Amino acid sequence: MRRFDVTIAGELNLDLILYGTPEEIPRERELLVSDFSVTLGASSAIVAHNLGSLGSHVGFVSCIGDDQFGDLALARLAAAKTDVSKVAILPGRKTGLTVIMQRKSWRNMLTYPGTIFDLSMEKLDFEYLSSAKHFHLSSFYLQRGLRPDVPELFRKLKNAGLTISLDCNDDPDDGWDGGIQEALKWVDVFLPNAREIMRLTGASDWQCAIEEVAKTVPWVVVKLGSEGAVARREKEQWSSPALKVNLVDPVGAGDSFDAGFLHEYIRGSDVKACLAAGNRAGALSVTRAGGTEAFRDADHRMKFLQLHGG
């Protein structure tokens, strides 16, 4: 028996989301926005929170500062029944923060890394991480302290009998290397969006990109936003349409898709069920501000999932 369904090592911070940000921001001007929200942020933490809210048993490893931002982020994650006993609180350090300037159809994300870069191989409890069926890593390019050792970590976890998933997320340096090709050799499920897989491979469209990555990774799952998602295994490919819902906030939709997909994957569900669960979780996410608020509202979450076959 494994202690957890999924373990995750990654970043834990808050998101400050500004709505109605002007399209252009001139210098030396005070500009107004229409609303704001402070929510649990960080791709790794959103996946962990939403997996826990869906009923998976999740163990989480991270570093935060000894500040109010860290306290709030930790409390939000623990409230989703995620085990946070291995989250290190670093004295004198500041917890990371992402400011998201949301416009009608696009956004900017400014991240102060804080303790994000402090997570390293030396801070990981391998016995804890390996006490699960599955291990997930998000934000490959943000894990600067851990990134050089990710291939070795994946190798050890595979040898311990775990399956592994990876969502690379964006590369702030726009280099799209950093050893990810070596890491992908150990990955069972790769979960990029269309832009990310195209940047990663240099392909001109996501279909060519998915064919390329499928030569290395058993399951390549590409998130296509309003067009749903596709999954590829060798020469076979499946698609699943997105749900039509009232969009409140797209922040965290991709991470929520990861949570829904993995919740079914670790239970041995077939690919169609996993894709449908991913799209359902992503759609649920956009009905509230931020990536976790729709999952925090238990009544709203249950009614939504029941309505849409969850």
Image: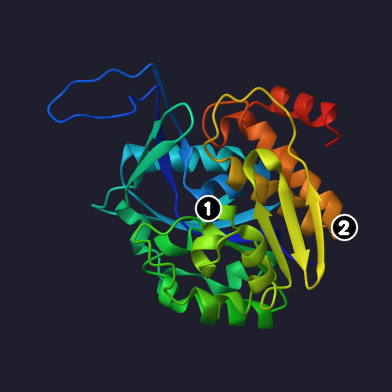
- Whole-angstrom CA distance, mark 2 to mark 1, is 24 Å
Under circle 1, the secondary element is: helix
Where is residue 208 shown, x and y percent of the image? 64, 66
Q: Identify the residue at image location x=57%, y=35%.
A: 292
Residue nearest the viewer, comparing 130 with 215: 215
Question: Of all residues shown, which one is farthest toward the front?
Answer: 204
Image quadrant containing the N terminus: bottom right
Where is residue 266 shown, x and y percent of the image? 78, 59
> What label sits on residue 270 in the rendered view?
2
Under circle 2, the secondary element is: loop
Relative to residue 139, is residue 308 drawn left or right?
Answer: right
Q: Is residue 223 above or below residue 20?
A: below
Label 2 crowd (10 A; few <14 / some 14-19 / many >=20): few
Number of numbered tags placed on the structure image = 2
Label 1 crowd (10 A; few <14 / some 14-19 / many >=20): many
> Which image quarter: residue 60?
bottom right
Relative to residue 275, is residue 11 drawn left or right?
Answer: left
Counting residues from the N terminus, which is met first, the one under dot 2 or under dot 1? 1
Q: Is residue 77 above or below residue 35?
A: below
Q: Identify the residue at image location x=19%, y=29%.
A: 26
